[in-house]
Amino acid sequence: MQTLTILGSTGSIGVSTLDVVSRHPDKFQIFALAGHSQVEKLTEQCRQFAPKFAVVADETCANELRKQLGSLKTEILHGKQALIDIATAPEVTGVMCSIVGAAGLPSALVAAQHGKTIYLANKETLVVSGSLNSIDELLELDSQVRGQAEEVAKAV
C-alpha cells in the first residue's frame, strides 16, 4: 500500500489524484494534504480522506480550516516548512507534487533526498531543479514532460 502526501490537493491534478485514491482504497492511503488557501475544498477533502495532516499557506487559513473541521482529528499546519515536513515524514512512501510553478521545488527535492517516490505533475519543478541526481524514483504525470531523452535534456 502506498502512503501518500499530496502537495496541491485542491488543484485539478490533486483532485484527480484523490479520485484515483478513492477508487483504490486497497492500494493507497492519504497521509497529508496541502491546499494553499483553498480552505473550503481542503475541508471537503479532509472530511473524505481523514489525513493525519493538512497544510495551508498561512496562520489565517490554518485557523479557518481548524474552525471548519471542528472535531476531525486532522492536524493543521501552515507554511513552507510544513510542506517539507509532510513530504518527508517516515510514514510517507510517495509524494504527488502538483503545486503550481517552482513553489513546489523545495519540498519535492527534500522528499526525493529522503527516498520518497516523486509523482511529478509540473515541468517547472524539473526545469528549475536542474540536476536530478538525488531522485531515486520520479514518475512524471504531465504529458508535456514526455519526450526523447535528448529532448528532455534540452528542456532541463
Image (cartoon, rainbow, N blue to C red):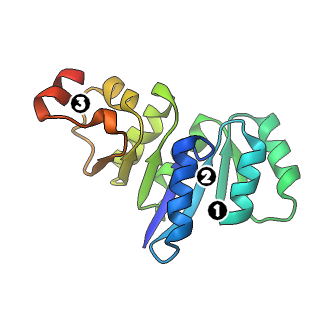
Q: Are marks 1 and 2 in contact (CB under 8 Å)?
A: yes
Which residue in the structure is indicated by mark 2? 33
Asked if 121 appears above or below 117 in the picture, the reply is above
Residue type, label 1? Pro
- Residue linked to disc 1: 51
At which x and y percent is residue 66? 83, 51
Among the two numbered marks 3 and 1 on one chain, the one whose residue lies closer to the N terminus: 1
User: Residue at coordinates 52% horizontally, 69% vertically from top-left?
Assistant: 23
Q: CA distance from mark 3 to mark 1?
A: 32 Å
Q: Nearer the viewer, residue 104 or 17?
A: 17
The residue under the point 41% across, 61% down is 93
Task: Tell me the residue at 25%/36% (across/down).
Answer: 132
Q: Are marks 3 and 1 in contact (CB under 8 Å)?
A: no
Which circle's residue, 2 or 3, is located before the other in the chain? 2
Which three-letter amino acid code belongs to the residue tagged 2? Leu
Where residue 112 appears, x then y in whole percent? 35, 46
Q: Is residue 102 visible?
A: yes
Disc 3 marks a residue whose amino acid type is Ser
In this rendering, would 96 be left or right of 65? left
Q: Which mark is residue 131?
A: 3
C-alpha distance separating marks 2 and 3: 27 Å
Closest to the observer: 109 or 96? Answer: 96
At numbered mark 2, what does the secondary structure look like: helix, strand or loop? strand
Element carrying mark 3? loop
